[in-house]
Amino acid sequence: MLNLLNLKDIPLFVNNSSIELTDTNMVYGKNGTGKSTMAKAIAQQLNDPDHCVIFDGMERFIREDKQLNAILLGTKNLEIEKKITEITISRVEIQTALEYSSKTLEKQQKNFDAAVQQYQDFVWDNIYRHFHDKFPEDLSGWGGSKKIFAEKLKQLGNNQPIESASQQSEEDILSKHNLIQAGVSLDRFVGFSSTLDTEKIKEVMVKTLSNVAKSEIANKISARKLEGWVRQGQKYLGPNKPCPFCGQEITQVHYDILEAGFSEIIDSAYNNFQNDIDTSLNGIQQMQYQLQTWQENTEMQSEKSDTTFKVAVSKEVASVKTVLKLLSKTVESKRKNAQQPIEIDDVLNSLNLALEELSSKIKEVNEKISTNNQLVANATESKEKLHANVLELMRIRCGQSDVRACQSNVKGFQNSLRDAKNDKNEKLMAVNNIDTEMAMLKAQTQSEEEAVNRINYLLGLLDNKRFKLMLPATNKEVSGYYTIEGQDGEQRTVSELSTGEENLIAFLYFFYLVEAKLSDGAPVTVVIDDPVTSNDDQSMFLIVTMIQNLLFKSKELNTRGNRRLQIFVLTHNSSFYINLKEWTQNPYTKTNRSFHLLSTPNGSTIKEITKKEEDIINNYDELWREARFSFDENQKQALWNQIRRILETYVKFNNWSGSLEKAVRNKIISTNDNERKLIALQLVKITQANSHSIDDLMQDLSPWSKEQICDAFKFVMETLGGGEHFEAHWSEDVD
């Protein structure tokens, strides 16, 4: 229960710090004077939501759902519906994002599919066709479709790579396939053996003709056993000197005889030198012939067994032939350079190297022949190894730049596709979470069947305007939603409900909550703010009757000495206010209090009504009360406005014409009191329907006192023949 309402922190109210409250509190005030603000202050300061029931408009209790063609009823249901509405807004945003994400995913899927197709086309054209043309048996089962082939290529990446030493070229594999297919073992090739005496040739090339001749002369001397003589006499001989042995002079004749003696020796030495060169050249020619014969024989063998051998050794054979030609040419050049030694070590080394390479190649070919013969002997195992080599070649081909570029392109789009899928899944999960939350909230809605039965009973009292709430035939699993059935038994569209009908349903539901609270036996505070909005006479009568019964119940409960029910009724409807007060018997006691909310230029004030004379009877009387209050408070602008409204009402009520108003103006003008006349003319002017304008309402009243304004008002009323009417409503002497 709330005994004191504190207003000092509410700027709307002036000259009010607090007001005392009691069991039944009636508050009357026109719209804009602060009724709703006062109702909220009562609820806040009471701070007991479990024992306080407030009616401050139908929005708290009822809401239309045009999609379901039903109304949602119940405070908790509306709270849940508010949460549902809030998360529905979030769902719309996420759903929009989900749709965008779905389109992005669709786009990325198309990009990825196109990249995959491009990769499949590429490997089909550049790998499958190539290897299938060369190794059709090894690629058996790899065709069928581009997709299957691409998948099989992908699986090759999981294979253990073959050691490079064991990997064979396509040519080797093809050759071995052919051997296995032929099923014939091959004979090994005979190697080439050189018979050339390279040491003899080297010896010939370092000799000179002089050395050979000297050697022959030395041989002659040695044969005649004159070595000692020559050695002993040589030191005594000299040119142009006499012989030391005989003393004779050595003349030209003696030299000629000596030369003739040695000519035979020199000729013999030259012939022997030429014979050595010829022998060397013959040896080289013999080796060339042997090489040619060996080559022809091996080529014949190669044509019959292994056609690759001819090609395999042709380079090495050509190298040996080239070196032999060079050697022959070098030896032949010795004839013209008989007196000089010629170094041929480089040529001989080249020959030996060429022969070694030829021998190595022959050995290599023979080893291949042995391997091939072994392949033929173990055909099944050999085919398996060759098949593995073919697959390894394809795996290596997949690692080349062009294929890797296609794979990288696919991987890039695959990553984008994965990101798009993850993003869509996140958005979809968010939507599902919201839908789950909405379903859980809807599951928390409460059935208001008992309240609806009570409401339908009260609605049945409306005679020919009756309607009732019905549980929908569909969506029965969702509580709190009800359709409208008219008096004819047909379902009505919720959009056809008037504001008054919705307000009535909301108030009846509110009253059901009040009764439910009272049945608990706990103290209850009831706040009713403007319950009659757009209601017809029957609905208003029903609402008034129910509130009157509540007032009686309050009196009954509280007279027992246990204060259990406190009521606040706030309204702008004077008829409603007056009607309710009559049922309180004496509204100005300690248990029944009445308040008026009055508007002033500075804000609203709350005036407690302590006697009947202070209270309102009807709207017109209330205008006089407000005018008197403004006069007492020296609020000249408010007083001026209220006098204008009184005069307008009085003129309309008496149905005065414009000609009569003109006559009144003439009477006012004829008076000698210019000051009184000026104010009175302004008052009369504003009695004309729709004649007052903004400048009239904003009339500068500063030169006139409240007494002057009131005196002019009295003068106008007397001129209109309403002097006694003025005296009756202006209860105090204003002079």
Image: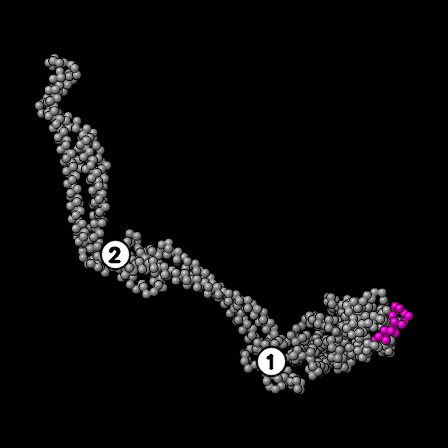
Of mark 2 and mark 1, the one earlier in the sequence is 2
Q: How many marks?
A: 2
How far apart are the alpha carbons under marks 2 and 1? 88 Å
Q: Looking at numbered disc 2 in the image, what kind of residue is underneath it?
A: Leu
x%, y% of residue 14?
Answer: 77, 67
SS at mark 1?
loop
Magenta extent = 661-677
Please give the residue where the numbered disc 2 appears in the rendered image. 174
Residue reaching furthest to the front:
659
Question: Is disc 2 surrounded by few (<14), some (14 to 19) or many (20+) residues within 10 Å?
Answer: some
Please give the residue where the numbered disc 1 appears in the rendered image. 493
x%, y% of residue 42?
Answer: 71, 72
Residue reaching furthest to the right:
672
Could one spot residue 546 in this view of the protein? Answer: no
Q: Is residue 453 left or right of residue 268?
A: right
SS at mark 2?
helix
